[in-house]
């Protein structure tokens, strides 16, 4: 079940903190779609707080 992948913030495809870019890379989808979905969630409730928490919790990739 585990394929060894880990979720990291994106260094290449980032707008603010690289959270949506990292999620898009992890899921293998276009990060723009993740950003659009996140924007919809942010407009309908606690999405901004969730983004900030994700930016703190999700680590940068190792050097």
Image: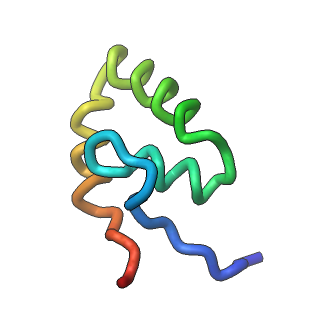
Is 25 or 47 nearer to us in this picture? 25
Residue appearing at x 44%, y 19% in the figure? 40
Is 20 or 57 nearer to us in this picture? 20
Check the picture and name the quadrant holding the C terminus: bottom left
Is 26 or 48 nearer to us in this picture? 26
Horizontal side of 19 relative to 52 (left or right) equals right
Horizontal side of 28 relative to 19 (left or right) equals right
Colouring rule applied to residues = rainbow
Would you identify the image quadrant in which residue 31 lies? top right
**Image location (x, y in percent) of residue 2:** 70, 78
Name, please, the residue furthest toward the front.
12
Residue appearing at x 58%, y 31% in the figure? 33
Q: Answer above or below: position of 8 versus 18.
A: below
Residue appearing at x 64%, y 81% in the figure? 4
Name, please, the residue furthest toward the right.
1
**Image location (x, y in percent) of residue 56:** 22, 59
**Image location (x, y in percent) of residue 34:** 53, 36
Check the picture and name the quadrant holding the N terminus: bottom right
Number of marks in the image? Answer: 0
Q: Answer above or below: position of 5 versus 44.
A: below
**Image location (x, y in percent) of residue 60:** 33, 69
Horizontal side of 56 relative to 24 (left or right) equals left
Residue appearing at x 38%, y 50% in the figure? 19
Q: Answer above or below: position of 42 versus 21.
A: above
């Amino acid at each position: 079940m585990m394929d060894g992948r880990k979720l990291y913030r994106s260094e290449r495809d980032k707008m603010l903190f690289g959270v949506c870019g990292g999620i898009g890379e992890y899921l293998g989808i276009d990060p723009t779609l993740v950003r659009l979905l996140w924007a919809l969630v942010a407009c309908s409730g606690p999405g901004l707080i969730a983004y900030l928490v994700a930016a703190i919790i999700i680590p940068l990739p190792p050097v």
